[in-house]
Every structure is written in C-alpha cells, then in structure tokens.
C-alpha cells in the first residue's frame, strides 16, 4: 500500500515515497500530516515529499489511531489496537505522546486495546475500547466509548454505545469521528453482524442511532468540514 497525494485540489493523485507497509489513518494538524502504518507513526511537513518515522510499530507498539491536541500540535494521543495489523504485538492502551520532548504517559481507566481516539475543541478526549484477540476467552473487558474530561488523565465508560455492540475487529479503521459542531459519531455491530451508527451531542450527551444497515460492515466513519458524514 501507499499514501497518494494531490496538489491540484484532488484532480489527480500521485504516490508518496519513503513509507513502509501502509494500513491505517491519516490525520492533519497545522503544517503536519500524521500517518499510521504497520511500521509505526510517520510525519510529513512538506506535502508528503518526505516522511519521518516518529515512533516504531509492529514488534513494539501496534498503533491504530492518532489524535492531535488542539491546544498543542506537539501533543498526540496514540491508540493501540492489536487486531488492526496482522502479526502485530500486543496493544498497550492509549498513549499520551509529546513529539517535541519524546515523553509519554498512559491514562487510567482503560484496557490495552483501544481502536480509536478523538479529542474535541474543548479538550474532551474519547477512546473507543474493544476486546482484543488476546483477551477473548481469557478475561472480561468492558467495551464501548470511554470519555475523559480531565485532559485525558482518567477515562470512564459512557452510555454512547452499549458494550454488547462493540465486537472485536468491527469498524476496523475508524469507528469514531468528530464533527466541527462537537457531535460524535460511533460505529457498532450487534451479535448478528448488523452495523449501526450512533450520534451523540457535544460531550457525549444524548446518544441516538442514526443509521443501521445489513449485508456489509463499514470500515469507518468520516465527517467532512461541511458536516457531511461518510461511511466507507
């Protein structure tokens, strides 16, 4: 795989260079673009002409998602999910990582398998926790959307999604998305493989199901700046 880049408003695309196996998310913030791959976390600040590996991947940490702190572009939230990359190492939960100093820490209240992370403009951090393949049949794991209102120090389970709707390896790449309005979208799948999409108001309040389907499970949900919601 590769990352493809357009410099003419999306009319044409060309491949990037300097990347290992690509499978995951791309997040932009300020003058940088962050990319998750099986080989780790990469950053480009020159329109993808060159990439720098910021942190390693398979064999040490299995990155699944990245969110950039709106108050500090050097502060990243890194989700680790052992089910995203084949043959990856065990997940290690959610990591608070500073790219300027290289320092990192982990919050309390979460298990090791976090599929996605998002942070809104007010600093509320959301983590999408699901049971990892190494946990199946070994220990119970509370799944669902967890919320932190203390700058990501501690997380508690929310009522945005029922734990029974978050299954292993569902909505594989992007089960969470934030709209500019602060609304949060979260994907789920029930025990009979029927997918659904839940929307919650700012802060995770008043969740309600806004879409349900059959026959296919989306890989992720994305919200455009215009507010349009896409399932892919």
Image (cartoon, rainbow, N blue to C red):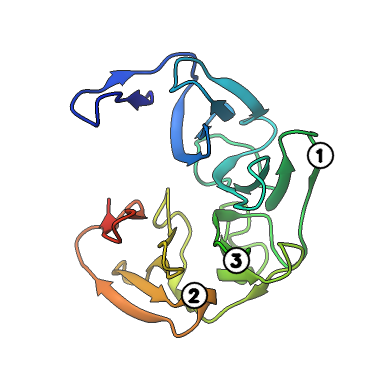
Q: Is residue 117 above or below residue 51?
A: below
User: What is the spatial separation of the Cα atoms under label 3 and label 1, in whole angstroms?
Assistant: 23 Å
Proximity of marks 2 and 3: CB atoms separated by less than 8 Å: yes
**Which residue is found at the position 68% from the left and 40% from the top?**
74
Q: Residue at x 73, y 69 (%)?
A: 150
How many C-alpha atoms fall within 10 Å of the one at disc 3: few (<14), some, or many (≥20)?
Answer: some
Question: Residue 159: image x %, image y %?
Answer: 53, 82
Q: Earlier in the sequence, mark 2 or mark 3?
A: 3
The numbered mark, 3 or 1, whose residue comes first in the sequence reads 1
Q: Which one is in front in this view, the residue at disc 3 or the one at disc 1?
A: 3
Label annotation for residue 103: 1
Residue 116 in view (yes/no): yes
Compared across the picture, whether 168 is left or right of 219 comes to right
Where does label 2 land, which residue? 202
* Mark 1 to mark 2 CA distance (whole Å): 30 Å
Element at label 1: loop
Would you identify the image quadrant in which residue 206 lies? bottom left
Relative to 86, 70 lies left or right: right
Q: Quadrant of residue 60?
A: top right
- Quadrant of residue 11 within the rendered picture: top left
Where is residue 182 shown, x and y percent of the image?
46, 68
For the point 55% across and 62% down, the residue is: 121
Query: Could you tell me residue 98's position as x and y percent?
Result: 74, 40
In the image, 116 versus 7, the foreground residue is 7
Q: Front-most of 213 and 174?
A: 174
- Taking the image as drawn, is residue 163 in sight? no
Do the CB atoms of the residues marked 3 and 1 lie less than 8 Å apart? Answer: no
User: What residue did someone put label 3 on?
Assistant: 122
Q: Earlier in the sequence, mark 1 or mark 2?
A: 1
Q: Residue at x 68, y 55 (%)?
A: 112
Q: Is residue 219 above or below residue 138?
A: above
């Amino acid at each position: 795989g590769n990352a493809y880049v357009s410099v003419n408003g999306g009319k044409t695309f060309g491949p990037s260079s300097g990347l290992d196996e690509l499978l995951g998310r791309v997040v932009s913030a300020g003058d940088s673009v962050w990319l998750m791959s099986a080989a780790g976390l990469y950053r480009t600040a020159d329109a993808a002409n060159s990439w720098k590996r910021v942190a390693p991947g398979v064999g040490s940490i299995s990155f699944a998602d990245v969110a950039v702190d709106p108050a500090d572009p050097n502060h990243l939230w890194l989700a680790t999910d052992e089910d995203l990359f084949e043959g990856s190492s065990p997940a290690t939960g959610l990591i608070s990582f500073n790219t300027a100093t290289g320092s990192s820490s982990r919050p309390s209240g979460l298990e090791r398998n976090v599929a996605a992370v998002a942070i809104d403009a007010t600093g509320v951090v959301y983590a999408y926790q699901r049971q990892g393949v190494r946990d199946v049949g070994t220990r119970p794991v509370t799944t669902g959307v967890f919320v932190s209102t203390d700058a990501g120090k501690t997380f508690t389970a929310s009522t945005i999604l029922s734990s029974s709707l978050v299954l292993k390896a569902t909505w594989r790449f992007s089960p969470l998305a934030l709209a500019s309005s602060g609304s949060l979208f979260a994907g789920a799948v029930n025990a009979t493989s029927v997918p659904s999409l839940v929307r919650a108001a700012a802060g995770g309040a008043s969740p309600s199901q806004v879409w349900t389907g059959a026959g296919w499970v989306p890989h992720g949900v994305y919200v455009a700046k215009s507010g349009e919601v896409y399932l892919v």
